[in-house]
Amino acid sequence: MLTDVTDDVPEPPAEYRLGELAEAAGVPVRTLRYYQERKLLPPPRRVGRIGLYSAEHLARLRMIANLLERGHTLEGIRELLAAWEEGRGIAAVLGVEKAVTAPWSTETPVTMPLAELAALFPGELDPGAVERAVELGILRVDGDRVTHWSRRQLDASVALVRAGVPLAEVLEVSRDLQRAMDDLAARFVGLITRHVVGTFAADGLDALEETLAELRPGAQVSVEAGFARSMDRQVRTAIEKVLADLAESRE
């Protein structure tokens, strides 16, 4: 005689209370409340004083967790979800976000023991210098190993120190250069935001992604070419001054 076999796995509930939703999503209740405050999670269906959440709320929480793991900020996720709700495909929106936030730097990081890095700067890489380099984002320390963000910049710093420039002054110039680059990057982003991004309608996201990709090398070339031109002028002026001083000393 055949008998019906029932599945012991319970059906997921059609609706969840706040605590149940938090448990199902694997997040604290306070996190759910915070998401609601930030408009990341739609309000629940109200039955009297009880809020009931649906499977769509749970799916959204899982999407938020996935995007956080991929490195998105909560504000960025909020904007992505808002765009999705307005009818723009999440894939298209993510494509534009990827084009905007993909690393602009093509530098190759280099990792080595701290002792090996210190050997490149004999007598100069004291704990204070390491701390300043970490604050500037040049170095990342992991135990007795360090990672320099750029092989090319490391080689340039070594060359300057070997030529007689103190490492402390190299780091000071690096700090000032970073500030100048931050200001320049902010101006460039402002130009793109005002004159490029704002001209694309919701259905033009693919074209916007392509345009942003085309602009990336132009921005890098503009900075490199402009700096090289400034160096040409400054070096020429400095050499002319040195030669003039030498001529005066011989008279």
Image (spheres, rainbow, N blue to C red):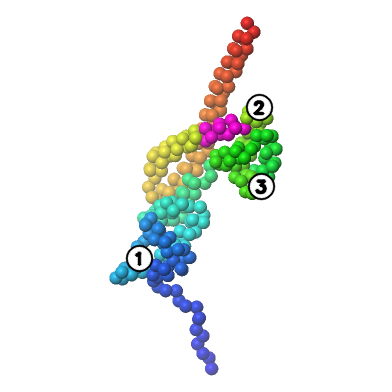
Q: Earlier in the sequence, mark 2 or mark 3?
A: 3
Q: Earlier in the sequence, mark 2 or mark 1?
A: 1
Is residue 118 left or right of 67 when viewed as pictured?
A: right
Which residue is the extreme one toward the top?
251
For label 3, the crowd category at 10 Å Cα-Cα, with few meaning under 14, some 14 to 19 and many 20 or more, is few
Which mark is drawn over residue 144?
3
Q: Nearer the viewer, mark 1 or mark 3?
A: 3
Main SS class of the magenta portion in the image: helix
Give the residues in magenta: 167-178
Residue position for label 2: 164
Q: Is residue 219 magenta?
A: no
Q: Is residue 27 visible?
A: yes
Residue 27, how many percent across, how many down?
A: 46, 63
**Circle 1 sits in a helix, a strand or a loop, which is it?**
loop
**Amino acid on which disc 2 is placed:** Gly
Callouts 2 and 1 close, C-beta under 8 Å: no
Residue position for label 1: 44
For label 2, the crowd category at 10 Å Cα-Cα, with few meaning under 14, some 14 to 19 and many 20 or more, is few
Callouts 1 and 3 close, C-beta under 8 Å: no
Which residue is the extreme one toward the left?
48
- Identify whether 29 is placed above or below 112: below
**Amino acid on which disc 3 is placed:** Asp
**Circle 2 sits in a helix, a strand or a loop, which is it?**
loop
Give the Cα distance between marks 1 and 3: 51 Å
Residue 68, how many percent across, how many down?
A: 49, 56
